[in-house]
Image: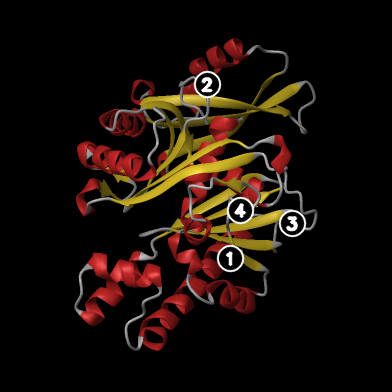
Amino acid sequence: MIFGLGRKQPPPLGIDIGSTAIKLVELSRADRASGAGHQVTRYAIEPLVPSAMAEKKIADIEAVGQGIARALRRAGSKTKRAAVAISGSAVITKTITLAGGLSEADIEAQIQLEADQYIPFPLEEVNIDFDIIGPSPANPGMVDVLLAATRRENVEDRIAALEAAGLKAEIVDVEAYAMELACNQILGGGPFAEPSVQTLAVADIGATTTTLHVMRNGQVAYTREQKFGGLQLINEVQQRHGISRDEATTKVVNGDWPAGFETEILTPFREAMVQQIGRALQFFYSATTINRVDRILLAGAAASLPKLDRLIAERLEITTSVGNPFAHMTISKDLSSTALNRDAPALMIAAGLALRGCL
C-alpha cells in the first residue's frame, strides 16, 4: 500500500522501524551475468532506546530519527529516499467491489465518497489508499479493489522520523505486504514458485509480538498478532544472570550462552514459542475453511535460535524453515555473507520494503 507518496525513482532504502531496533536494507539491480535479480549492497541493525517506541507506535520521533541516522552511518548509505511500513494492527484493510472500466481517478473519487462506510474514524483523521486487485471472480464486469486506511498520525510520525534522519519518505507500506514480497522472493517469485506451497504460514517473532501471516497463493489472507516475543528470552537471561539487557542481547545473538542456558531458559522458551504458533494456527483454521498449511517460515531475530525450526516441524508436523530473503540475491563484496545470513530473518520486512522500491 502506498499512502499517497509517489515512487517511480531509483530504489529507496527499506527501513523497518521495530519496537526495539531499526533494520535497514539497501538493494540494487544485480548484473545480468549473475543470474540474480537483486544485489544486497548495504544493511544495518541499530538498537533503539527503550523510550523510542510504545508497542509498535513511535513515542519519541527524535529518538527514532537518531536511531535511523545511526543505522545510516553504520551501513554507510548515501541514499536519501526510504520506504517504511506500518503495523497491520494499525491499518484497516477491506476488499470492495466496484464497476469495471473505471479509471484510477474515478476509483479514488468513488472511494472518497463511500469511505465512511468502511472506515470507523473521521475521514480527516486518516490516510486512505487502494490497489486494484483485478476482475471480481464473483461479480462479472466488476473489479475487486483493496482499500487500506490508517490514522494520519501513523503515517506522519514515520515521515517525521525519517526527515529527522535526513531522509525523504517515498513509500509508506503495510508490514504484512512487505512480508509478502520478501516471502515471494524466498520461494522464487510470487505467486509461490514451489507448486506444493499454496498456503504458507509466516511466524514473525518480534521483540514483544509474534505475528502470524498466512499467505494463500502468494497473497496475505490472514494476520494475527500475539503478545509473545524474543524480548522475553532476553529478559529471562538478564534476570537469571544479573546482567544488563544489552549484555543479555549480545550473549543470545552471539550464542555465548551462560551456564545452564540451554536447559533452564532456551528449552522452555522454544516450547512456549511452539505453543504460541500452534495456537495462532488454530485460530486461523477456525476462522477459515482451510485446515492445513503447507509450510511454516520463521522470521524475526529469534527465528535463528538453535533447533527452533526443528522443534516446530516435529510438534506441528509441518515443514518449517528459517526465512532468508537474500538467498537468491548476490551480496556486495563489502558485506560479510556470514553476518548477513545470520541477521537475515530479522531483515524480512526491511528486505520487502527495499524490494517494493525496486518494482
Question: Is the residue 161 above or below the residue 215 in the image?
Answer: above
Q: Is residue 276 above or below residue 100?
A: below
Q: Nearer the viewer, mark 4 or mark 1?
A: 4
- Say above or below: 220 vs 7: below
User: In this figure, which residue is indicated by the disc labeled 1?
Assistant: 282
Choose mark 3 or mark 2, whichever is in front: 2
Which residue is the site of mark 3?
Answer: 197
Seen at 19% across and 78% down, the residue is 242
Q: CA distance from mark 3 to mark 2?
A: 33 Å
Q: Amino acid at mark 3?
A: Val
The residue lying furthest to the front in this view is 333
Residue 211 can be seen in this image = no
Quarter occupied by residue 168:
top left
Label 2 and label 1: CA atoms lie apart by 42 Å
Q: Nearer the viewer, mark 2 or mark 1?
A: 2
Q: Nearer the viewer, mark 2 or mark 4?
A: 2
90 with respect to 239 (left or right)? right
119 left or right of 183?
left
Which residue position holds label 4? 214
Would you call the spot at circle 3 few (<14 residues within 10 Å), some (14-19), or many (20 or more)? some
Callout 3–callout 4 Cβ contact below 8 Å = no
Going from the N terminus, do you reach mark 4 or mark 1 first?
A: 4
Specify the quadrant of the image occupied by residue 262. Answer: bottom left
Label 2 sits on what residue type?
Gln
Mark 3 or mark 1: which comes first in sequence? 3
Q: Residue at x 70, y 58 (%)?
A: 290
- Work out how far the residue at label 2 is from the one at label 4, CA to CA, in angstroms: 31 Å
Q: Horizontal and vertical percent for residue 145?
A: 63, 27
Q: Which residue is mark 2?
A: 9
Question: Quick one: label 3 or label 4, which is nearer the N terminus?
Answer: 3
Q: Secondary structure at mark 4?
A: strand
The disc, 3 or 2, on the residue closer to the chain's N-terminal end is 2
